[in-house]
Amino acid sequence: MQHLMTSLRCYGIGVKPQTENDIPRLSKLLRIPILWTPGDFAFTYAIPDSIGRSFIGLPAKAKGIDLQFKAFHEFGHILSGHVGDEPEILWYDKLSRDKREIEADAVALIALMPVGSDWQDIRTSRFGVRLYNERLRLYFTYGI
Ligand SMILES: [Zn+2]
């Protein structure tokens, strides 16, 4: 996890709270194009480097904390190295307890609420309160 944290900091994640403006910035920096999709679904299309570039899909109608969490979750898959030997679609599923989904959630939580920043602002909706509680659990369990 420490190695991942170091690599995340190279992209500003865990340094300061990421915002909606950081979504196109990271897309450009990581060279991960965003496909804006109809409907509610978000996903990472993970393609091994030998074949081509991965991309992420985000719901065009999502906004605010919902969009930010989904975007940094999907970037989290890429940054955590969840790209196998075969092309694969990782569907966003907040209820999944798959290890890769948990890791991607952790990256998103750290992106939105780095240690040292004020986490109170996120609690403006039920989803925000849920993320805040998950962030506290991550901090107290792993110290990150
Ligand atoms: Zn995922």
Image (tube, rainbow, N blue to C red):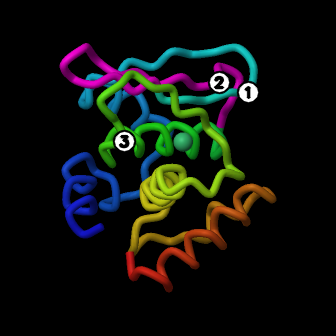
Q: Is residue 101 above or below residue 52?
A: below
Residue at the far right: name it.
126
Q: Is residue 42 above or below residue 143?
A: above
Give the percent coordinates (x, y) of residue 44.
Answer: 48, 29
Describe the element under mark 1 as helix, strand or loop.
Answer: loop
Q: Is mark 2 within 8 Å of ligand 1?
A: no
Describe the element under mark 2 as helix, strand or loop.
Answer: strand
Judging by the rendered image, the residue that carries numbered circle 1 is 40
Judging by the rendered image, the residue that carries numbered circle 3 is 82
Mark 1 vs 3, N-terminal side: 1
The magenta segment is: 45-63
Q: Estimate the spatial distance between the alpha carbons at disc 2 and disc 1, rounded to whole Å.
A: 5 Å
Q: Is residue 142 above or below residue 15?
A: below
Judging by the rendered image, the residue that carries numbered circle 2 is 59
Mark 2 vs 3, N-terminal side: 2
Q: Nearer the viewer, residue 88 or 102?
A: 88
Q: Estimate the spatial distance between the alpha carbons at disc 1 and disc 3, rounded to whole Å.
A: 22 Å
Describe the element under mark 3 as helix, strand or loop.
Answer: loop
